[in-house]
């Protein structure tokens, strides 16, 4: 079943706040093999000009993927998540994510296209602090395999 095109341009309300802790940053840095002390030691981070330890750039995936669940689980969209593969992911950082941040995410559907029997959803997650300071823009492409209407079905 093809995805509902009326979702293009839809935005969801901001997610509940995600509190970034030093421990979460350290765990993520360990998981991705990032050894820099600015991800572990507050004094090293301060010496580098940051107020506290900072997260590796891809840490934003933890926050954005959780917030994107509001779209993925929306029954009106008609997305069969068992058929979804993650096609692409990019981040535009406005500043590093740091320990102590309380981040909220607003999820936007930028596009829904169909190609070769697949529905392709372009999602933008605007990550900001609770106070409204923009931190990161995460863009992802979700490919729902074999869900788009083909010319024979249209």
Image (cartoon, rainbow, N blue to C red):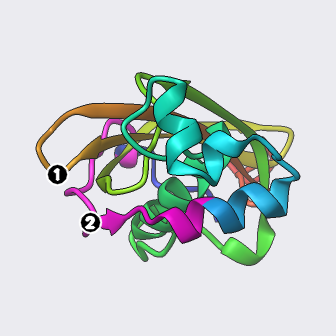
Q: For the magenta stretch, what is the residue range?
A: 7-25
Q: Position of residue 101 (x, y in %)?
A: 32, 52
Q: Residue at x 88, y 52 (%)?
A: 33
Q: Which residue is mark 1?
A: 130
Q: Which residue is mark 2?
A: 17
Label 2 or label 1, whichever comes before in sequence order:
2
Query: Decide: marks 2, 1 in contact (CB < 8 A)?
Result: yes
* CA distance separating discs 2 and 1: 7 Å
Q: Position of residue 67 (x, y in %)?
A: 42, 62
15 part of magenta stretch: yes
Q: Is residue 112 left or right of residue 106?
A: right
69 part of magenta stretch: no
Indicate whether 58 appears above or below 71.
Answer: above
Q: Residue at x 45, y 32 (%)?
A: 137
Please identify the quarter of the rendering in which residue 12 is found: bottom left
Depth check, front residue: 69 or 120: 69
Q: Position of residue 44 (x, y in %)?
A: 59, 38
């Amino acid at each position: 079943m093809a995805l509902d095109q009326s979702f293009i341009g839809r935005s969801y309300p901001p997610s509940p706040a995600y509190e970034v802790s030093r421990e979460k940053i350290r765990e993520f840095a360990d998981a991705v093999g990032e050894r820099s002390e600015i991800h572990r030691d507050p004094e090293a981070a301060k010496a580098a000009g940051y107020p506290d330890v900072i997260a590796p750039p891809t840490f934003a995936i933890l926050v954005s993927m959780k917030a994107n669940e509001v779209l993925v689980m929306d029954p009106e969209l008609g997305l069969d998540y068992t058929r979804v593969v993650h096609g692409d992911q990019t981040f535009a950082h406005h500043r590093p994510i740091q320990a102590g941040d309380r981040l909220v995410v607003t999820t936007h559907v930028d596009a829904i296209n169909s190609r070769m029997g697949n529905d392709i959803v372009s999602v933008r997650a605007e990550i900001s602090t609770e106070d409204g300071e923009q931190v990161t823009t995460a863009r992802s492409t979700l490919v729902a395999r074999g869900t788009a209407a083909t010319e024979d079905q249209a």
